[in-house]
Image (tube, rainbow, N blue to C red):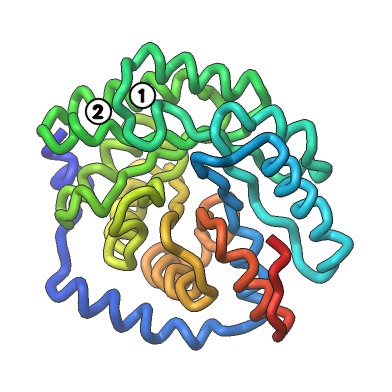
Amino acid sequence: MEDLIDKYSLSLEKAIEQKVKVIANNSHQYLDKDILKFLFKTLDLTSLNTDDTFDFIKDLCHKVNRLESVYPDVDPIASVCVYPIFVETVKENLKNKNIGIIGVAGSFPSSHTFVHVKKAECKEIIARGADEVDVVMPLGNFLSGKYKEVYDELKTLKEQVGNNKLKVILETGLINDYRKIQLASLIAMEAGADFIKTSTGKLKPAATYDAVYLMAQAIKAFYNKTGKTTGIKPAGGVSTAEDALSYYAIIKEVLGDQWLNNSLFRIGASRLANDLLSHIRDEEINHF
């Protein structure tokens, strides 16, 4: 597995931090209402709190349902992301069936449980109505250099999900090594991940510009070699329109316009929706 970097001809650029900083700092050029509306369309609106209740998730769904009437000029979000127990609640209460349902699985956020338990949870989430499943890469094995075990587990979980999307969370803030972020990205894609995602949002640092740049590089190399497109999802701490625009700029720079759609680019967030709506409408909005 360690030879994947060479297999895909990936190399680290010099002064990568400086390059990413320049891209992010120049993202203001994209401060356009149409792009802000596009970013709203990429949202995986997320509620993964210990104190979530069925009533709270129902209310969240009702707020999503109201978007069409309150903000008719703004397209719907991409999906709603919740804990497994709430997947059926979202399915029962979301009116727009084009909005996806995501369940987190695999002993989220730690990934510290038995593989057969993770398999069962993935299968159950799909059976209860999820369109997509987000799982955390078994980071303990990855950090221990057990790359084959990581690959085997993710491949098995993709088999449980089938034609539904599997998003693999790398928890890049804990990897904290540029080359290993690339390696983690490639292992996940080799195993069949439909998306690679930065973070659970439960640890700091969560999403960072550098990590997303490295992941995008890996996706591009994988695509050039295999012809397979893999989605990318910054998640964790993305709370302002300015942050979202910076990630937009990085994806545009590295992967190009082909990735600028919500089939291949998502942002996982809970607070970002209000800020994007506020910038689109030029007034403070607290819809969520």
Q: Which residue is mark 1?
A: 155
Question: Upstream in the sequence, badge 1 or badge 2?
Answer: 2
Real-space CA distance between mark 1 and mark 2, rounded to the nearest whole angstrom: 9 Å
**Which label belongs to residue 196?**
none
Residue 18 horizontal side relative to residue 62, left or right: left
Hey, what amino acid is under mark 1? Lys
**Image spot of residue 158 (x, y percent):** 44, 25
Residue 265 can be seen, yes or no = no
- Neighbourhood count class around disc 1 (C-alpha, 10 Å): few under 14, some 14–19, many 20 upward: some
**Image spot of residue 117 (x, y percent):** 40, 15
| Tag 2 secondary structure | helix
Label 1 or label 2, whichever lies nearer to me, is 2
The residue depicted at 45 percent of the width and 70 percent of the height is 252
**Image spot of residue 170 (x, y percent):** 31, 44
The residue depicted at 72 percent of the width and 39 percent of the height is 55
Q: Is residue 83 above or below residue 177?
A: above
Q: Is residue 263 above or below residue 143?
A: below
| Tag 1 secondary structure | helix
Q: Which residue is mark 2?
A: 150
Hey, what amino acid is under mark 2? Val
